[in-house]
């Protein structure tokens, strides 16, 4: 156990902070499951936070001048470089504190919110540099599995088979032809102290992970499964049902990697068939039985891999009781 | 008090930056900028400079980190050249649009292709519309002084400043320089205090979307700020002159009082041009040099005054503006002339690309060429000087 | 109060077009996006707070009696609160003009 985490008791539905770092009146679509984890993360972090956001839906919905939804100091610079902007902020805080020009006893959290496009694709180099250099910051990837802001184009995070506007379900090629990039693997290879996956259908778990990520000294990364009813073709009220099914089918397992140790937060012993997950999303409606079978097989394999990692480099599973 | 040191100009620049007590340095190595950032790393690691040095993985990242740090209220520095500048390009406009007082030493180098590490101004000219203030140094002392001025001006105007230093022919030569006494510098350049910054005590939003209803106003405000920087720059130079006796002007002249023809030039080649003036003046020829120290904001009035009553101006550009009506400085000069009644002929030469030497003898020849235009109009809007046919 | 878009002179802009008032989007009404409205049945509600934590639009606030009340100025009518209420205490009702 990391000493920074020793005193952290965790949030529960009964002791949630009242504070909101994100304000109402934002322009995210009805039922947006990408803005929800953003809101929850800021709630967990509290006001002593500086946020950086990459170009993408969350930047657009939160900052059409003269309105801002940010209650914390916020900067948006570009699409790909948020990790480095955060590096600069973190370095500035360090230097200014050391030189007595910034008097803040409490730790100032530096947090990045970036989409899957910003993280998996265009910003991977910036992210890698910042993780490697060891800046003390939290990077939260809100992975809605495509470039939503520009009209649902595929990214390296788009799942196999999914229809997007640049991986359309055509007559011959039916949707995304590649498997989702193993971003967690790439991140973990940087040997950072804290990495985790999270999901807004498990809000307390998500908030706890964000808080831990902030408490840990050094870089922390959270891969958040983020739903997008508009881009995925799901009903807005099903936003979190989809998210829950992603965990229950093992499509998106919840785990943490603390100092290289894998902890599966929610073991899924009796998984639901992936088909249940796929069939409620229009982006998958063209899938052939062969494609579905392939996805099922690959999901099983990936989950097995994760179990092996947890067995080899793991700690026993910690049970969740809050949701 | 003012001791002279023989220093490589890059090292002197790094020491001037350190004297300015920067908080955050973020840079990526590229020839010919390397000695500056290496020396700064050394100063930090030896405990001689209390700063965070971020060894980023690219120049885009270098500027991105400066943006983050400057927005948090830190005094920042970066340096680059050519390809590095081009990789940084996107963020250059963001730095100025966000009004961040970042200082960059731009060690000028030609842009690929063909790949070349040698000096010209094709890198800086690619960013002339990016909203930065630009100084051009002619020698080591100016390079050092302009770093001091850059911080002073950046922090008063809330605009980023680039100090242009010719690669190799200036950056790598050893020259005598004097550094400003630290106590005097501390008075000249007080600690950075920024009103609006990323601070949890007073949360602000930086980088909001400029919807069509506001983008025009935002750009107007930025443009006015750049124009208004002119007076602040003059004041910074006046204050500096009081401290050191060294005088800086937006446009400097050499033997222009009665000049009939003059060369307009920026950067360190001006020294060769001035040597050519001495040779020709000894023969009774009325020649002079107009040296542009402040490139952005372009000092039109000073320029028009500086050219006096010349009959022909020869603008020596150090970059090609492909498909344009001249080199970048040539275009600027013609446009400035149109704002007055002065109509000297303009000969526009593009010279010294990729470190090709333009010696004082070459400048003598250029002056002679310029004299020819007194009787004969130039036949092309611009030409590439010294090219082998 | 931020002025309406288009009414701000360049002279009144903060440098860099910074927005100096945090969270001022709360002045922006998103309630008119709604087709369905969540209606709470207080008899079924166990005040667990799930609706409050899962609303992407931060609509719910607890009243003096501990009930979570939806602010219709913001509610976009997505139905997430209703779908995830463990007691099915919220129903989505069609908005009438
Ligand atoms: C350098 C650059 N290339 C392309 C774009 C266009 N662009 C803006 S946002 C975006 C996609 C964002 O996707 P993602 O990061 O997944 O965020 P999302 O909108 O899906 O939340 C793209 C392609 C850009 N702004 N900058
Ligand atoms: S497009 Fe998707 S991610 Fe973007 S705001 Fe709408 S629902 Fe959210
Ligand atoms: S989720 Fe349902 S039961 Fe829980 S507080 Fe909300 S309305 Fe009441
Ligand atoms: S319907 Fe959606 S927006 Fe309205 S209160 Fe429920 S969760 Fe919030
Ligand atoms: Mg996305």
Image (spheres, rainbow, N blue to C red):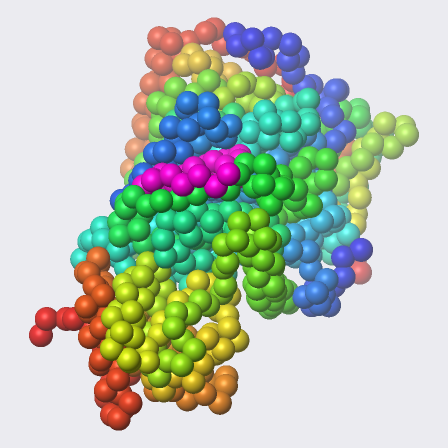
Closer to the camera, A25 or A102? A102
The relative height of residue B231 versus residue A155 in the rendered view (above or below) is below
Closer to the camera, B184 or B314? B184
Residue A94 screen position, x and y as percent: 56, 27
Q: Is residue A226 magenta?
A: no
The relative height of residue A241 versus residue A12 in the rendered view (above or below) is below
Q: Residue at x 70, y 31 (%)?
A: A47
The relative height of residue B107 versus residue B222 in the rendered view (above or below) is above
Left or right relative to B195: residue B98: left
Can residue B243 be seen by looking at this rendering?
yes
Q: Residue at x 65, y 31 (%)?
A: A101
**Which quadrant of the figure has residue A308?**
top left
Question: What is the total number of numbered labels drawn onto the structure image?
Answer: 0
Image quarter in which the C terminus of chain A is found: top right
Residue B279 screen position, x and y as percent: 25, 70
Q: Residue at x 68, y 56 (%)?
A: C14
In the picture as drawn, the residue positioned furthest to the left comes out as B389
In the picture as drawn, the residue positioned furthest to the bottom comes out as B375
Can residue A152 be seen by looking at this rendering?
no
Q: Is residue B23 magenta?
A: yes
Closer to the camera, A23 or B184? B184
In the picture as drawn, the residue positioned furthest to the right comes out as C64
Instruction: Please give the range of residues in magenta.
Output: B1-26
The relative height of residue B72 versus residue B206 in the rendered view (above or below) is above
Residue B162 screen position, x and y as percent: 45, 53
Closer to the camera, B4 or A177? B4
Q: Residue at x 74, y 20 (%)?
A: A15
Residue B285 screen position, x and y as percent: 28, 80
**Which quadrant of the figure has residue B14?**
top left
Left or right relative to C1: residue B263: left
């Amino acid at each position: 156990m990391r000493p920074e985490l020793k005193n952290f008791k965790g949030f529960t539905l009964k002791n949630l902070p009242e504070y909101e770092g994100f304000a109402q009146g934002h322009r995210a679509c009805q039922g947006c499951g990408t803005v929800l984890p953003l809101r929850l993360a800021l709630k967990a972090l509290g006001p002593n936070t500086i946020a950086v956001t990459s170009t993408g839906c969350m930047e657009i919905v939160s900052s059409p001048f003269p309105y801002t939804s940010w209650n914390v100091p916020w900067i948006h610079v570009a699409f790909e470089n948020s990790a480095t902007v955060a590096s600069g902020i973190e370095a500035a805080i360090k230097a200014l504190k050391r030189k007595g020009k910034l008097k803040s006893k409490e730790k100032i959290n530096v947090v990045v919110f970036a989409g899957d496009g910003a993280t998996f694709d265009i910003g991977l180099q910036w992210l890698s540099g910042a993780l490697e250099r060891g800046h003390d910051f939290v990077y939260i990837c809100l992975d809605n599995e495509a470039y939503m802001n520009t009209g649902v184009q595929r990214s390296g995070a788009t799942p196999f088979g999914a229809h997007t506007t640049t991986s359309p379900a055509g007559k011959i090629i039916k949707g995304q032809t590649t498997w989702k990039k193993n971003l967690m693997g790439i991140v973990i290879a940087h040997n950072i102290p804290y990495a985790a996956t999270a999901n807004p259908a498990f809000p307390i778990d998500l908030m706890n992970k964000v808080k831990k990520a902030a408490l840990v000294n050094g870089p922390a990364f959270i891969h958040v499964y983020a739903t997008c009813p508009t881009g995925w073709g799901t009903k807005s009220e099903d936003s979190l049902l989809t998210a829950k099914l992603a965990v229950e089918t093992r499509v998106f397992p919840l785990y943490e990697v603390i100092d290289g140790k894998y902890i599966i937060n929610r073991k899924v012993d009796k998984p639901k068939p992936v088909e249940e997950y796929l069939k409620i999303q229009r982006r998958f409606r063209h899938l052939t039985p062969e494609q579905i079978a392939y996805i099922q097989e690959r999901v099983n394999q990936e989950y097995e891999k994760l179990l092996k990692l947890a067995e080899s480099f793991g700690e026993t599973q910690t049970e969740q009781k809050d949701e | 008090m003012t001791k002279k040191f023989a220093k490589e100009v890059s090292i002197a620049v790094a020491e001037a930056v350190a004297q300015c007590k920067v908080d955050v340095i973020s840079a990526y190595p590229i020839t010919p900028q390397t000695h500056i950032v290496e020396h700064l790393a050394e100063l930090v690691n030896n405990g001689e400079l209390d700063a965070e040095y971020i060894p980023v993985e690219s120049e885009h990242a270098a500027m991105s980190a400066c943006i983050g740090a400057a927005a948090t209220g830190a005094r920042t520095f970066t340096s680059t050249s050519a390809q590095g500048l081009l990789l940084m390009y996107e963020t250059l406009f963001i730095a100025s649009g966000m009004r961040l007082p970042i200082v960059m030493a731009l060690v000028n180098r030609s842009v690929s292709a063909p790949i070349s590490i040698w000096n010209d101004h094709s890198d800086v000219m690619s960013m002339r519309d990016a909203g930065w203030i630009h100084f051009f140094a002619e020698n080591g002392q100016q390079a050092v002084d302009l770093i001091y001025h850059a911080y002073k001006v950046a922090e008063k105007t809330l605009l980023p400043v680039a100090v242009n230093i010719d690669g190799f022919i200036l950056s790598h030569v050893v020259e005598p320089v004097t550094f400003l006494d630290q106590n005097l510098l501390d008075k000249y350049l007080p600690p950075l205090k920024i009103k609006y910054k990323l601070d949890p005590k007073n949360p602000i939003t930086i980088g909001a979307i400029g919807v069509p209803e506001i983008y025009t106003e935002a750009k107007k405000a930025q443009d006015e700020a750049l124009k208004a920087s002119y007076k602040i720059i003059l004041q910074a130079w006046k204050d500096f002159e009081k401290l050191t006796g060294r005088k800086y002007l937006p446009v400097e002249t050499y033997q222009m009082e009665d000049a009939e023809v003059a060369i307009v030039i920026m950067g360190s080649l001006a020294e060769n041009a001035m040597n050519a003036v001495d040779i020709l003046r000894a023969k009774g020829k009325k020649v002079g040099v107009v040296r542009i120290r402040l490139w952005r904001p372009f000092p039109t009035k000073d320029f028009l005054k500086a050219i006096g009553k010349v009959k022909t101006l020869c603008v020596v550009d150090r970059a090609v503006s492909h498909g344009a009506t001249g080199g970048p400085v040539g275009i600027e000069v013609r446009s400035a002339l149109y704002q007055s009644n002065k109509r000297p002929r303009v000969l526009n030469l593009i010279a010294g690309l990729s470190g090709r030497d333009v010696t004082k003898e070459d400048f003598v020849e250029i002056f002679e060429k310029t004299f020819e235009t007194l009787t004969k109009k130039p036949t092309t809007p611009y030409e590439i000087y010294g090219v082998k046919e | 109060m931020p002025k309406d878009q288009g009414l701000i002179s360049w002279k009144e802009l903060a440098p860099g077009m910074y927005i100096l008032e945090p969270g001022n989007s709360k002045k922006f009404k998103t309630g008119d996006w709604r087709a369905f409205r969540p209606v709470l049945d207080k008899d079924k509600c166990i005040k667990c707070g799930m609706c409050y934590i899962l609303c992407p639009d931060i609509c719910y606030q607890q009243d003096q009696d501990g009930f979570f009340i939806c602010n219709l100025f913001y509610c976009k009518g997505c139905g997430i609160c209703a779908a995830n209420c463990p007691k099915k205490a919220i129903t989505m009702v069609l908005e009438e003009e």
